[in-house]
């Protein structure tokens, strides 16, 4: 819950500091996604059930493991969300690009395990007219780092 509160405060601060241009909106989306992933991993550990994240070209959604299958998450915090400007991210795992299709896969591409571990990943969020990319790096330990990189470094 603390992570969600911090994400909301960070979003409010981002909006109050400057305009609401694409760069600020993308920064806010990246920070919100980082906070939601952290929150999902925290909830997975507390609840003893894996929580997955499924990405498609329209947005992302969270699901909860029910041993044999994945069910949509039933909390307001983990509701489905759309990508800013309709631009899906570039997702890689183990250095290989993960295809993001028009429809979310049955099994999530990223999983927060009940043990506190996370599927290691790299996700680049970008808008075509911006020179920066917001990069999320998820570690197996559950840590998620957010950095701004030059779009040419992708």
Image: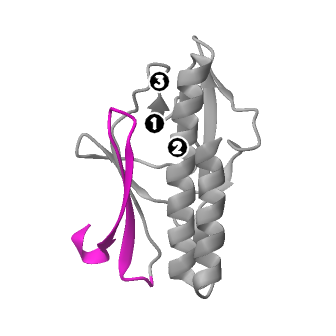
**In this figure, which residue is indicated by the disc labeled 2?**
37
1 or 2: mark nearer the eye: 2
Q: How is the image coloured?
A: one colour
SS of the residue under disc 1: strand
- Distance from the alpha carbon under mark 1 to that under mark 3: 10 Å
1 or 3: mark nearer the eye: 3
Rendered location of residue 50, percent (x, y): 54, 23
Mark 3, Cα crowd under 10 Å, few <14 / some 14-19 / many 20+, is: many
**In this figure, which residue is indicated by the disc labeled 1?**
110
Marker disc for residue 113:
3
Task: Depth check: give the residue in front, 107 or 75.
Answer: 75
Q: Is residue 101 left or right of residue 95?
A: right
Mark nearer the N terminus (1 vs 2): 2
The quarter of the image holding the C terminus is: bottom left
Q: Residue at x 25, y 76 (%)?
A: 152
Task: Depth check: give the residue in front, 104 or 33.
Answer: 33
| Quarter occupied by residue 7 | bottom right
Q: Is residue 152 visible?
A: yes
Q: Residue at x 66, y 70 (%)?
A: 12
Taking the magenta stretch, the answer to whether it contains residue 85 is no
Is 4 situated above or below 23? above
Is 4 situated above or below 13? above
Q: Residue at x 62, y 20 (%)?
A: 47
Mark 2, Cα crowd under 10 Å, few <14 / some 14-19 / many 20+, is: many
Rendered location of residue 151, percent (x, y): 31, 75
Rendered location of residue 15, percent (x, y): 63, 78
Q: Magenta region: which residues? A: 129-154
The answer to the question of whether label 1 and label 2 lie on touching residues, with beta carbons closer than 8 A, is: yes
Is 42 situated above or below 47? below
């Amino acid at each position: 819950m603390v992570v969600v509160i911090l994400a909301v405060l960070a979003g409010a601060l981002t909006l109050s500091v400057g305009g609401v241009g694409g760069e600020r909106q993308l920064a806010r989306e990246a920070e919100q996604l980082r906070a939601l992933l952290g929150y999902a991993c925290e909830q997975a550990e507390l609840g003893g059930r894996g929580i997955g994240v499924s990405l498609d070209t329209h947005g992302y959604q969270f699901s909860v493991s029910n041993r044999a299958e994945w069910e949509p998450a039933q909390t307001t915090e983990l509701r489905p969300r759309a990508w800013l400007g309709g631009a899906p991210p570039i997702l890689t795992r183990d250095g290989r690009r993960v295809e993001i299709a028009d429809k979310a896969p049955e099994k999530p591409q990223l999983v927060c395990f009940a043990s506190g571990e996370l599927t290691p990943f790299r996700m680049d969020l970008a808008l075509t007219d911006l020179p920066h990319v917001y990069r999320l790096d998820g570690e197996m330990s559950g840590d998620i780092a957010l950095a701004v990189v030059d779009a040419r470094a992708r």
